[in-house]
Image: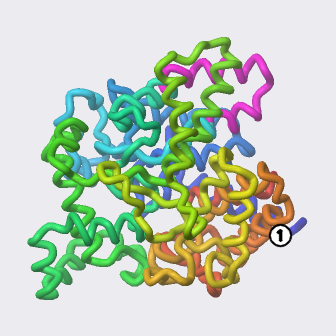
């Protein structure tokens, strides 16, 4: 189709513009560094254009891997213009951090195994096996780190220590919890006196997008304060948990982890490798423990507090992502599909909104508090297909592509009218549009 060819050409142009040789920026002005799950999504689209370049995208993530196995959510550009960004995190405070590369001190959803397998699908068997072998040690170390550091009680669900680790940066479940339980006194004082508006003078993100489409000033202060406290603890998980900094067993992250674990098993089988016994046992515990995030009363899944095991009863798009995990029952999958169909929940004109319409947080233009994102649509489409909801998957695929056809490769979109929001020429939007065109 002519429209498909034009869309693919436009998307390819975006990826070429944001290409920095070894990695692809999410968007030039707003996101100049390399992000973990961005590169994973980007490689899934790049594989249709240049499989060697897709491999480079993922291999470049391993240069930032910590000695303990962590893959950081950001690898910073070494450009002198971004010295402040590197210093804000100062990853060198932790002895496990790389010596010659500045990174963040936290991670992001574990999409790497998915991306490795998707890129592998474009390779003939001998080359695929070599590709898996190149990624194996880093990938295995990452999964081992997730359980060693983020499942300290061997419960099966891994915990997160910052909302940015969810990938859904200011998602309502986390922000509501943070504001209720962890907001510093000085932030409350600034907000109460309206002095938090001074933050606007120092924000770089609002130079690329209107403030109405980004974090609120209160959220910026709250997220900065959490990051500052993690830095003060040198990103040491024992010190962080010992001092009662908040920790959440996040629904999005654990949904993606279950799927990633299955991919890891597939890669291990292909390489005739045995997963370490402890890791295999942890992976099984995750599948069993995941059921604890289901609430019979509301018929939804929720994240929960690591310490108290209380659910964070604020709905978001995360409640649909167990479809991607692929581990839940067909009956529960059907119940989630009902939410997807419901016009008061997620069934808006341009789905899928990042929070349901009924949420008190719903704002169709504000970052992860209402807009539709292409990457979460991609995850849901994949899950719908595997559960046999082919018609739903096909409709959502077409609506997602139509959204990009009409409004180009923006970062996110208004689910009520489809209008483009956030950064322009956004890489994962471009890459995943290509992948959906090819699927």
Magenta segment includes 22: no
- Tell me if residue 64 can be seen: no
- Image quadrant assignment for residue 184: bottom left
What residue sits 59% from the left and 49% below the top? 41
**x, y percent for residue 193:** 11, 87
**x, y percent for residue 159:** 38, 45
Outermost residue, front direction?
297
Q: Which residue is mark 1?
A: 3
**x, y percent for residue 392:** 80, 66
Q: Residue 254 or 16: which is nearer the viewer?
A: 254
Q: Which residues are magenta?
A: 116-138
What residue sits 65% from the left and 51% below the top? 324
Q: Would you say 317 lies left or right of 334 here? A: left
Q: Would you say 329 lies left or right of 190 here? A: right
Location of the N terminus (image quadrant): bottom right
Q: Main secondary structure of the magenta part?
A: helix
- Image quadrant assignment for residue 203: bottom left
What residue sits 65% from the left and 63% below the top? 377
**x, y percent for residue 26:** 49, 56
Q: Residue 241 or 301: which is nearer the viewer?
A: 301
- Tell me if residue 156 can be seen: yes
């Amino acid at each position: 189709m002519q429209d498909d060819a034009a869309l693919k050409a436009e998307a390819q142009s975006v990826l070429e513009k944001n290409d920095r040789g070894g990695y692809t920026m999410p968007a030039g002005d707003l996101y100049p560094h390399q992000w973990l799950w961005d590169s994973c999504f980007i490689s899934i689209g790049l594989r249709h254009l240049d499989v060697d370049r897709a491999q480079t995208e993922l291999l470049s993530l391993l240069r930032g891997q910590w000695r303990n196995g962590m893959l950081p959510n950001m690898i910073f550009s070494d450009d002198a213009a971004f010295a402040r960004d590197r210093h804000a995190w100062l990853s060198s405070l932790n002895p496990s951090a790389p010596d010659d590369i500045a990174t963040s001190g936290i991670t992001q959803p574990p999409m790497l195994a998915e991306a490795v397998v998707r890129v592998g699908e474009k390779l003939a068997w001998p080359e695929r096996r070599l590709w898996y072998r190149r990624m194996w040690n880093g990938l295995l170390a990452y999964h081992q780190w997730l359980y060693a550091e983020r499942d300290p009680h061997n419960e099966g669900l891994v915990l997160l220590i910052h909302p940015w680790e969810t990938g859904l940066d200011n998602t309502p479940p986390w922000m509501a919890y943070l504001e209720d339980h962890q907001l510093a006194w000085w932030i409350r004082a600034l907000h109460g006196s309206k002095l938090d508006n001074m933050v606007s003078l120092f924000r770089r993100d609002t130079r690329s997008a209107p403030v109405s489409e980004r974090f609120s000033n209160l959220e910026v202060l709250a997220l900065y304060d959490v990051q500052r406290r993690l830095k003060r603890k040198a990103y040491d998980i024992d010190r962080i948990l010992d001092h009662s900094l908040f920790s959440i067993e996040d629904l999005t992250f654990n949904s993606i982890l279950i799927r990633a674990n299955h991919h890891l098993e597939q890669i291990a089988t292909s390489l005739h490798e045995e997963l370490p016994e402890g890791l295999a046992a942890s992976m099984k515990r995750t599948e069993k423990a995941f059921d604890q995030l289901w609430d019979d009363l509301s018929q939804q899944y929720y994240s929960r507090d690591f310490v108290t095991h209380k659910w964070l009863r604020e709905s978001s798009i995360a409640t649909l992502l167990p479809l991607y995990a692929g581990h839940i029952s067909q009956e529960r999958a059907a119940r989630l599909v009902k939410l997807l169909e419901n016009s008061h929940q997620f069934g808006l004109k341009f789905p899928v909104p990042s929070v349901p319409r009924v949420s008190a947080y719903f704002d169709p233009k504000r970052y992860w508090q209402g807009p539709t994102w292409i990457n979460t649509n991609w995850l849901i489409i994949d899950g719908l297909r595997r559960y046999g909801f082919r018609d739903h998957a096909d409709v959502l695929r077409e609506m997602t592509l139509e959204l990009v056809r009409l409004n180009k490769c923006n970062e996110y979109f208004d689910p009520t009218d489809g209008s483009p929001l956030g950064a322009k020429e956004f890489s994962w939007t471009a890459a995943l549009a290509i992948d959906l065109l090819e699927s």
